[in-house]
Amino acid sequence: MESITRASRVSAAFVKIADALVDEYDPLDLVQTLVEESVELLDGTAAGLMLADPNGVLQVLASTSEEARLVEVLQQETGTGPCIECYDAGAPVTIRDITGTRDRWPAFSELAVAQGFRSVHAFPLRLRGRSIGAMNLFRVDVGELGAEDIAVGQALTDVATISILQERTIRENAVVNDQLQRALNSRILIEQAKGMIAYTANIDTAEAFQRLRGHARSNNTSLRDTAQAVLDRTLTL
Amino acid sequence: MDDLCSALCAAFMDALPISGVALSAFTGSERETTLCASDALAARLDELQFDLGEGPRWEAVVTRSPVLLPDVRSMTHEKWPVFGTALAGTAAQALFVFPLAVGAVDIGVVELYRTTPGDLTESERASARVLADRAAWSLLRQLLVPDSGEDAGIGLSASRREIHQATGMVLAQIGGTAAEALLLLRAHAFANGQTVRETSDEVLERRLDFTPPPDA
């Protein structure tokens, strides 16, 4: 019975995503949905998606929690860790027990274990043999993902790649780089707007993000445009 | 700084079919400076627009979008009539201006000119945007961490989201522009022997507030 429930959950998630991939979809909101769905479907505790910036350094584009500590773990990985290894190799990386990586990635393993994470699974964002980033899924249990889970995780990650690179027929590297940078630049606008909202409304940055997303969704605008309006002071949230 | 700017200009010259390039950054002082130019005409085109207070460079800054003039002699220059006339008297036949911005922080502009008319291809435009973005990041990093050429470690990385969130908070406190907010963070950090990241954390924890006193 459980597998039926599970299959229907997976298909429901993809129907929801396909539904979101309409003409004027917002790639950042969609990527946010994807990391949230990956946690739901793969029994994770947290997930984050990172894109390579022009210097090849991974930057967080979306994470399930806005909590600074999760982002800290992800960003720690800009130096070394399973996510960057996954990005470099363009292949999935599974760490069944993070405590076993103390020698390999001391800073990463310490931060991750302090968060209660015990295993991590990284899926590459791939575009015709080129790696553009990686998605990290953290779980509280030690262990590997099953073959089916890996397939689901990679499929969600592939959808993320497609949604970030909006032109389906991209052949030019420059156009790909341009779109990656636009996504990362949008994220910076969002961070700046979060700070502005948090200060003005006297709330934390996580709640500021929820307000931003809620407003974008109910007004059918993108997170980027909403953040820009906040920064231009034409919108107060 | 000069080395960085020359390298950034060289990158545009290498990658694109252009005759010259000028890179101009906002330094936070009242008068910005042209950081570098590949030749005298490139520098002059930037200075002209700056002195006249009109021209595509200003449009690129305000709209945060590229302004592309593929054939400057056959077009009317309604938005910048004086500069348009001056431009027609130079050897430049095409002018392409790309804004340098990181989020809402305006860093400057890059101006590319060519002595033959014609549009940039889609791929060339994308390349120019990528180079402009890279230049914006490099200049921002230089602004925040002037003593180290590269990100010298996690604590200094200009890409940390705390710095951007704190910029937003300071923006709410002082009004003005995001660039001013970021420069204020930087100034406070330097004056107190902190990294910009440490100052940003104080702002986020609400231990530091730049709101001007009521009667100041």
Image (cartoon, coloured by chain):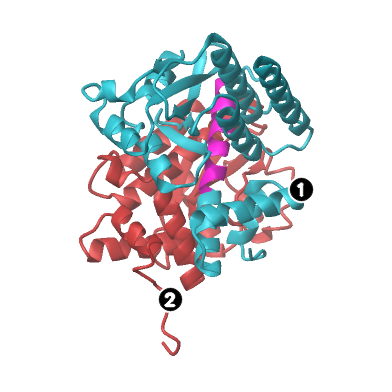
Chain colours: A cyan, B red
Name the amino acid, label 1.
Answer: Asn
**What amino acid type is highlighted by mark number 2?**
Thr
> Which of pointers 1 and 2 indicates the residue nearer the eye?
1
Identify the image quadrant of residue A97: top left
Q: Per the image, is A177 magenta?
A: yes
In this orientation, which residue lies closer to the viewer: B32 or B167? B167
* Segment tinted magenta in the rendering: A173-188
Q: Which chain is indicated by disc 1?
A: A
Residue B108, position as x, y percentages in the image: 48, 52
Q: Decide which of B189, A116 is in the foreground and name it.
A: A116
**Can residue B39 be seen at all in this image of the molecule?**
no
Give left or right: position of A108 versus A141: left
Apparent side of residue B174 relative to residue B158 in the rendered image (left or right): right
Look at the image and say whether residue B36 sits in the magenta stretch: no
x and y percentages locating residue B34 in the rendered image? 42, 53
Q: Residue furthest front?
A: A1
Q: Secondary structure at mark 2?
A: loop
**At x 39% / y 67%, what residue is drawn?**
B206
The 10 Å Cα crowd at callout 1, few under 14, some 14 to 19, many 20 or more, is few
Q: Write the residue at 40% across / 35% down.
A: A74
Give the residue at mark 1: A220
Is A42 rendered above or below residue B52?
above
Element marked by disc 1? loop
The image quadrant that residue B81 belongs to is bottom right
Return the residue at label 2: B211
